[in-house]
Structure formats: C-alpha cells, structure tokens
Amino acid sequence: MLAPMSAGLDLVTTLFINAFIHLLMALLLGLFWRSARRSGEVGFGWWVLNEALLFSAALALMALPVLPEGWVLGFNNAAYFAFTPLLELGLRRWFDRPLRPAMDLRWAVAGVALVGWTGLWLGGQDYATRAVWFAAVSVLQCLLLGWWVAGLLREAPGGARQGLALIALAAALGALMNAWRLQQTWPHLHTGQPVPTYPLSTLMAVDIAIAVLRVAAMLLLLHGRVEARLRQATVALERRANIDGLTQVASRAHFEAASTVLLTQARASRVPVCLLVADMDGFKAINDQLGHPEGDALLVRFAAQLRASLRDGDLAGRLGGDEFAVLLFDSPLEGAQRIAERLRAGVAGELAAADGRRITLSAGLALARPGEDFEALYRRADRALYAAKAAGRNRVVAEA
C-alpha cells in the first residue's frame, strides 16, 4: 500500500494519527461489544476485530524501517483487503441476513486481490503498479459494500437507517478517494519516475474520517437496537397492564378507564351505550370440584365465545373471577339484548365442563343515562345481573 517510508513527514504523521484513531475505535467498540454480547447481539465482534486489524496494520507500517518490508507490506495489504468483507460480515450477522453466496464472493475478491498484489511484489513490479492494483481492488470492494448496504437500507427498520446511511456514505467516500488515487497514480506506471505521496497521504487522512463515520454508524445501530428493544418491552408491559393474561380481553383497570372515555364520546355524539355484566352459573362449584385448571380452561373458552359474539367497536373486559363486562357502543337497549341473548344461547349450547355438565350464563344489562358515569352505570348493570340470578339463572335481565 505504501511508498517507501522516506516519502516525507506528512505521510509518517498521517500514519501515526491513523493508527491512533483505529486503536481508539477498537477500544471504544470493544467496550460496547461487552454490553452487546450480554444482550445476545451478534456481529459486533467482527467490527471490533476490523478496527484492531487496521490498527495493527498501521502499527506494522510504522515499524517498517526495522522489519522486513515484504512481510510488513503483505500484512498491511491483507488487513485492508479484509476490511470491507469483515465490515459486511458483521452487518449481515447483525441484521440476520444470509452469508452465502455473497460473502463467498467478497472473500474471493479479497483473496484474489492479495494473491495479485503478492505476485506483483515478488515479480519486482514498481510501487505505481502495486498502488494501482490496490486502489482498483479497493474501489471494487467499496462499491460491492455500498451496493449491498443501499439495498438493506430500503428494508431496514427506522432505528437502523441512520447508521446504515453513514456506512453507505463511508463506502461511497472510500470508493471516490481510491478512484482519485488510481487516477493520480496511473500516469506513473512503468515510467521510472517517483510517485507523488500526496494521493496516499490524502487517502489516509480521509480514512480517518471514514473510520469515525464507520464507528458512529455502528454505535447508531447499537443505539437503534437498544431503543427498539425498550419500545418492545414498553409495549409488552402496557399490554400486560391492559390485557387480562388468561382470557385476552381487557383487564379491569383498562376496561374501566376505556369505558369512561367511551361514555364521554357517546355523550358528545349522542349515541346510546349499554353495559352488559355477566358470569357463569355455578362456576365456583366447578373450580372447587374439578380444580382451577379446568376453571381456567372454561374461562378461556367463554372469553373466546364472548369475543366472537361482539361487534367491531364493542369493548370486552374481565372484571375478576368469572365476571365479565361488555360496553356496547352505539347500541340501544333492544339491540344490546339481542347480542346478550345470542351470547347466552351460545354458551348454553356449546360450553361444557370436563365432567359433561352444561354451563349457563346469567347477565345484566343497563342503558347509560345522560351524564351518568361508569360507576353508576356498572351498579345498575350489576343489580340486573343479581336479578337474573334470583330469577333462576341462565337468563338476561335488563335494568328497567
């Protein structure tokens, strides 16, 4: 990759800064890698290895005056040819994308590049020839990486797009700079004239900016993943608070809060709202005689029938034990009675305990009055439920 180390102070200084930046990036990514591993993330380790490899390559170049030139330059070029495949490998693992056959192609390009450079070195080709080879391969690798990242960017979740955009920008910048170096070095092929060092010095300076972009992208990807998991955890907690875990209808707290909102909306829209309160007859005896697992199974099956009997916009909730409630929005009392009777008949005809005994349902109905809050509406529906029990059960009673 490099011209002789006597090329000038600017190149040596740039090389030192390059090595220092890659070391910092490797250490920084290594710290975040520990937390990524604990959360089960994969792929981050390849990025840590990448930065450590680039640091080692720059460090070896700084020791070029005291180490065999062929070995140092060979290691340096191997590290840079492996750079984009390692970056893409980490991304594919991070986003759970298939590795083959794409990574086979990436590693094949890197292998051919190293073999070709080694052949040029052993064949005694001049620095210009080797630099043109290196730059041409680097342009190809950056284009392959950028093309794949651009495709991934279109389908990636929102939290990952900023990081992927930075990686695509870094790949485009790397391709442009290597193409510029290729254009600047090409006229010196086989001329015997010394190759100017400013293309390489500029490329290494830009490489520092690319390294910062790359690491910023990786940290953005990690931040996006952590943020997405926090959102998922929040949604799960909200669902756990709002949904009854056994029956998958609204919990009591959520049902009461949502019913209050719906009653306010109904008053504003001047539409009728009815509250249905129901429970299964003799449920306590089933729990005591057949056990709680059988009682839970009945609750699950009843809740499924309840959901199937309702219309879109109706709200069903479990108030506790075997007591359920339904807020029937935009439903006059006659329509609510038909829905309740359909539910009662369905339970009586289809629901049975494990020992064969039939399950029946008692329900109370109340039509919301103007200005009435949920608590008052619930008390009236609950009185109607008790009236249904007192009248012999397996019936629906509407509060007068």
Image (spheres, rainbow, N blue to C red):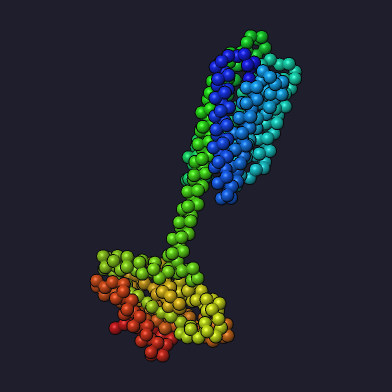
Residue name at image x 36 percent, y 69 percent:
256
Query: Is residue 128 depicted above or below 75 in this figure?
Result: above
Query: Is residue 15 depicted above or below 308 in this figure?
Result: above
Give the quarter of the figure containing the C terminus: bottom left
Residue 184 showing in the rendered view: no
Task: Determine which quarter of the picture holds residue 110.
Answer: top right
Residue name at image x 54 percent, y 24 percent:
17
Q: Position of residue 367 (x, y in %)?
A: 30, 76
Task: Determine which quarter of the picture holds residue 61.
Answer: top right
Residue name at image x 57 percent, y 18 percent:
11
Q: Position of residue 69 (x, y in %)?
A: 70, 20
| Closer to the camera in the image, 119 or 337 | 119
| Closer to the camera in the image, 75 or 91 | 75
Q: Position of residue 104 (x, y in %)?
A: 68, 38
| Closer to the camera in the image, 4 or 313 | 4
Left or right: where 215 falls relative to 81:
left
Query: Is residue 195 depicted above or below 96 in this figure?
Result: above
Task: Determine which quarter of the picture holds residue 75.
Answer: top right
